[in-house]
Every structure is written in C-alpha cells, then in structure tokens.
Image (cartoon, helix red, strand yellow):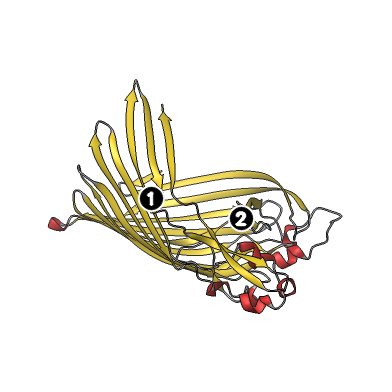
C-alpha cells in the first residue's frame, strides 16, 4: 500500500506446517529417535519512510505464534539508509540496521565419533516445540560503500550480535542417555540453552577495469559462547570462525572469451586444534593422565598454524543460440602447502598419547564445465 509519495506499507501473513523425524547415534551416543510436527502462524508489517532525497527509514515488526502453545514471539527490526553523490568525492552509501531475530527451526551439527571421519559432523534440522524456547539474538550492523571513481569501490562493514538465548547439543547428556530408550526421545533431554556473543567487521577494495578485475578483502570475526556440560560453563571461542582472513581475487581477460583467474587466501588465529569429537565426547576418565597434558577442556589454547592457499586457472566462455557454456581448467593449492586441518591423538601402550597433524589436500588439478540455458 502506498500511503504517499515517500511512504509505503507492506503487510504479509502465512501459515507454516513442518514435520520432522530424527534418528541419531554413534559409538558414544545411543540410538535416539524423535518425531514431531509443528505449525506456526506469522504476520508481519514493514513500513518505508522517505526522509528526503537521500535518506530512507525502514521499520518492521513480525509476530509469530505456535497454535495451542499460547506464546506470541515479536521481532522488531529497523534500518536507516543514506545514499548520496558528493561532488568530486564520488558516491557514498551508508546503512545501519538492527533488530531482534528468532529461529523456529534450528540447525544442529552432531559431531561424528570417528577421529578420521571425512565429514566431521552430521547435520539435522529440528522444528522447536515446548519446552524448547526459540533462540533469540539482537543484531546491530552497519556498512559503508564508497565509489571514489567509476572503476573503484571500497566497502566497510561491522556487526555485533548479543545472543542471550541459544540452543546446542548437550554431549555429556547425550552420552549418558539410556542405551535403548523405551519411547521416542524428548529433544530437551539432549538439547540445552546456551548464550554468547559475536562481533566482526571487514574492509574490501575492488577494481573493475578492462585489463584487470580484482579485489582485496580483510575480515575479522570473534564469537564466544557457552557449551552445555563442557568447559565449566564458561564462554569460550567457537570453533567455526576464522578470526583473521585475507582474500585476494584477480581476473585478467585475454579476449575471445578467455581469462586468467587467481584466488589467494590466508587465515590466522584458528583455535580448537584437535578433532571436534575429542572436545565433545572425551572425558578425564577416557584419557587418564594424558587429559592434563592435552588440556581438552581449554580449546581456546589450541592454536592451529596459519592456512595459506593459492588457486589459479584459465576460464573460457562461449554462447551458441542462447546456450552459454563456461569451462575452467586450473590448479588448486598452487604452492603445494601442507596446510594443517586439525590434530589427531594417537594412544600408546604405555598410556601416553601423542599428537599428529592431519593435512588438507596438496596441489591438485581441477576441471569444471557449466552449461546455462
């Protein structure tokens, strides 16, 4: 609905119905089964207000209820956007956004028990029902875009998340569950509340010209949270972030649909050096004296070495009668570095435990073809 030249209102509503079935288990966790079906009613209103030629204010509210459970969850959000061309300084765009976000279908990654598992986690999605309360996060973000010249663009961004209520798998409770449950398992028995925060930012410089297209980007991120039943209830750095990441991309057109491509990346500050299964399942009783030596209750102290990669290749593009074909031939990890993915533990007959590094693949050839119609 247009309420005026600078005012607009959008209203929406919907009904979502979900069914889920989960069956999990491994050498540490017994066989657990769960089935559920849930419904959600949602309505949302979004308003856009123009505050001049260059300024726009967006605001909205989403309400979600689960029939039969009585609670209505509110998610207010807002954004302020500013765009303007400033004389010889080019074009500037600024955006500030914030709001409350909830998750009614939550993703969980169950850590595999095999120390040499190719895929370290098994992913499952669980529609939340009572007594599990949907996760709640307050999010504030800002980004600035500056185009000082037609071929150049500089982007800056930053964000902060307050996470007073999250959900995570409680591995000690999962390990202690009955070996053969007589009835379907209530998810609240192995999923517990946690809390934490996340913050980060980045800077990217991009150039798009006839002889060269490329970008250089640096990103910083830090996130901490508690893990149910682990690490004494204290907040620790999460294992899935790359604290410092520097990425470089370049493309040089050669004409006739040919182009040279290169991508380089460096990552520093990774923690949780051992396999995730060790932190999730092992206890002092499992390792004995080696527990104090390896300090698996302090994952933030297990710093992995930096990871460096460089990929290069040739791309060719052709189009015939509306059908586009794009092929790539390249070399991944041109430098042939033996980047460390994580560490494994090797027990010995005398009761000691040694550490061995597990490396990512070395130099390898890659070929790909994409057809678009």
Please tell me the numbered disc located at residue 334.
1
Q: Nearer the viewer, residue 292 or 175?
A: 292
Q: Which residue is drawn at 76% across and 57% down?
A: 186
Q: In this view, does 14 lie to the left or right of 158?
A: right
Q: Which of 331 and 76 is in front in this view?
A: 331
Residue 113 against residue 286 in the figure, above or below: above
The quarter of the rendered structure image containing the N terminus is: top left
Can residue 241 be seen from the camera position used here? yes
The x and y percentages for residue 184 are 80, 53
The crowding category of the residue bearing disc 2, from other C-alpha atoms within 10 Å (few below 14, some 14 to 19, many at least 20), is some
Residue 111 against residue 370 in the figure, above or below: below
Please tell me the numbered disc located at residue 120.
2
The quarter of the rendered structure image containing the C terminus is: top left
The x and y percentages for residue 262 are 33, 48
Can residue 158 be seen from the camera position used here? no
Q: Distance between the residues labelled 1 and 2?
A: 26 Å
Label 2 element class: loop
Residue 230: image quadrant is bottom right
The crowding category of the residue bearing disc 1, from other C-alpha atoms within 10 Å (few below 14, some 14 to 19, many at least 20), is some
Q: Residue at x 63, y 54 (%)?
A: 117
Q: Is residue 208 left or right of residue 316?
A: left
């Amino acid at each position: 609905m247009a309420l005026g030249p600078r005012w607009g209102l959008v209203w929406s509503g919907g009904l979502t119905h979900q069914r889920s079935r989960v069956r999990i288990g491994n050498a540490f966790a017994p066989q657990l089964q769960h089935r559920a079906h849930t419904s959600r009613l949602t309505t949302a209103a979004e308003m856009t207000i123009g505050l001049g030629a260059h300024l726009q204010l967006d605001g909205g509210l989403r309400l979600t209820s689960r029939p039969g459970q009585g609670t209505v969850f509110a998610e207010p959000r807002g954004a302020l956007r500013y765009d303007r061309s400033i004389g010889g300084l080019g074009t500037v765009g600024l955006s500030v956004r914030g709001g409350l976000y909830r998750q009614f279908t939550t993703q969980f990654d169950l850590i595999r028990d095999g120390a040499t598992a190719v895929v370290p986690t098994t992913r499952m999605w669980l529609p939340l029902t009572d007594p599990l309360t949907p996760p709640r996060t307050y999010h504030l973000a800002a980004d600035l875009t500056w185009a000082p010249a037609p071929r150049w663009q500089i982007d800056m961004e930053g964000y902060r998340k307050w996470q007073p209520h999250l959900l995570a798998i409680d591995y000690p409770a999962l390990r202690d569950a009955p070996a053969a449950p007589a009835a379907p398992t209530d998810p609240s028995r192995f999923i517990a509340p946690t809390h934490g925060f996340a913050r980060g930012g980045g800077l990217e410089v991009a150039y798009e010209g006839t002889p060269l297209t490329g970008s250089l980007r640096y990103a910083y991120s830090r996130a901490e949270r508690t893990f149910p039943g682990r690490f004494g209830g204290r907040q620790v750095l999460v294992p899935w972030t790359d604290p410092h990441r520097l990425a470089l991309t370049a493309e040089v057109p050669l004409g006739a649909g040919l182009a040279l491509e290169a991508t380089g990346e460096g990552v520093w500050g990774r923690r949780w050096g051992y396999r995730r299964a060790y932190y999730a399942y092992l206890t002092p009783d499992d390792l004995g004296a080696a527990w104090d030596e390896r300090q698996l209750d302090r994952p933030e102290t297990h710093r992995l070495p930096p990871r460096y990669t460089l990929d290069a290749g040739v791309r060719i593009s052709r189009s015939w009668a509306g059908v586009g074909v794009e092929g790539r031939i390249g070399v991944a990890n041109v430098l042939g570095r033996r980047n460390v993915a994580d560490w494994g533990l090797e027990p010995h007959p005398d009761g000691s435990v040694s550490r061995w590094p597990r490396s990512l693949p070395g130099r390898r050839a890659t070929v790909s073809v994409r057809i678009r119609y």
